[in-house]
Image (cartoon, grey):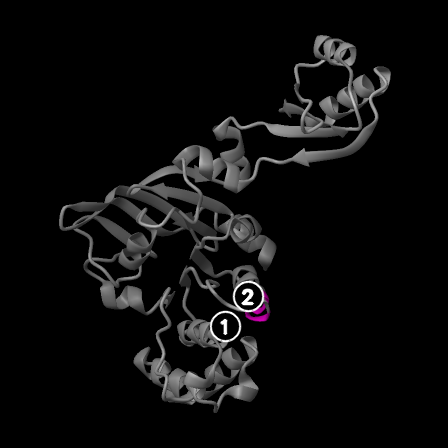
Amino acid sequence: MHKNHRIYFKYNKMITVNNLKKTYGNVEALKGINLSISQGEFYGLLGPNGAGKSTTISIMSTILKADAGNVQIDNMELGTNAQACKKIIGVVPQEIALYSKLSAYENLLFWGNLYNVESSVLKDRIDQTLHMMGLYDRRNDIIKNYSGGMKRRINIASALLHTPKILFMDEPTVGIDPQSRNLIFEVVEKLHKDGMTIVYTTHYMEEAERFCNRVGIIDNGQIVAEGSLQDLRTSSGIKENILIRYASISKEQIEKFSERMQAVINQEEKTIQYPTTALKSDLPKIIIACSDLGLEITQIDIQKVSLETIFLKLTGKQLRD
């Protein structure tokens, strides 16, 4: 099923966003966003604070209205079919959306009824999601006594009660404990494997690299790059880097090495840096060059082109800026 699903999502659009614009006062939050997300895809929307990613998610999930442009959800126009669209989407917002004086079970009962889940199946759905989130044994505890990570998990559970086709997750792992974070990872990976379309924003690059089929990088209200990690690596033009650390080097060795390899030698840090687009062939060459010249190598590091590096080049900012 998973293999077929992977082929299937390439041809079936679940979300289409055309020229989306949104202004707050004199601030253009969105300046014409265009997105296309396929069925079963795990799509990451990344950007620094204030870039427009939460506004985009809020419009796609019917929380906000756009000033211009349109959104299609599963071939339905969001503007004219908002209620039908709401039935097939789940939303995990940045802020915890729970009633602190109610138990976890009571919260899920409330949200399930709000989604019009039939009473005959709601209890089973609540039990399933509580087990999924590792909180079944704490189901009768009052939410205000939960840790931040536990609240996050119940927040996610409430978005899954009506078995949505699409799940919007806006920074679901911010400020939580490692146990909750790892459990959330397991849950989203299972949901994706089972065919759910997931749109995910995060400030953690490792999450995007781990989960996402494709990534859209948003900055100043515009998509500045989009594609798989490999697509972004290629289009960025950033090279991988071979970093050699050595014990010592003489002036003569520097001259001879420079004749053979176009590398950057830092005598103060005792390093040789060699940018490359052909790692497999260049790594043996630089090792042989060091050996021929009598350089004692103490360490070799391969610095891959990371999403963080690409993001920094495209936006001039760290993701958390």
Number of marks in picture:
2
Q: Nearer the viewer, residue 305 or 38?
A: 305
Q: Which mark is residue 149?
A: 1
Q: Nearer the viewer, residue 187 or 197?
A: 187
Q: Position of residue 113 (x, y in %)?
A: 33, 84
Q: Position of residue 262 (x, y in %)?
A: 66, 14
Q: Position of residue 302 (x, y in %)?
A: 69, 34
Q: Quadrant of the N terminus?
A: bottom right
- Magenta stretch, residue numbers: 179-184
Give the distance between the C-alpha atoms of the residues marked 2 and 1, in whole angstroms.
Answer: 7 Å
Whether the magenta-drawn stretch holds residue 21 is answered as no
Q: Residue furthest left?
A: 25
Pointer 2 local density, CA inside 10 Å: few below 14, some 14–19, many at least 20 = some
Q: Residue furthest front?
A: 268
In the picture of the structure, the residue carrying the numbered disc 2 is 181
Name the residue rendered at 64%, 24% in the picture.
276
Above or below, 200 against 109 in this view is above
Image side of residue 16 versus residue 215, left or right: left
Q: Position of residue 224 (x, y in %)?
A: 37, 36
The secondary element bearing badge 2 is classed as helix
Q: Residue furthest bottom?
A: 140
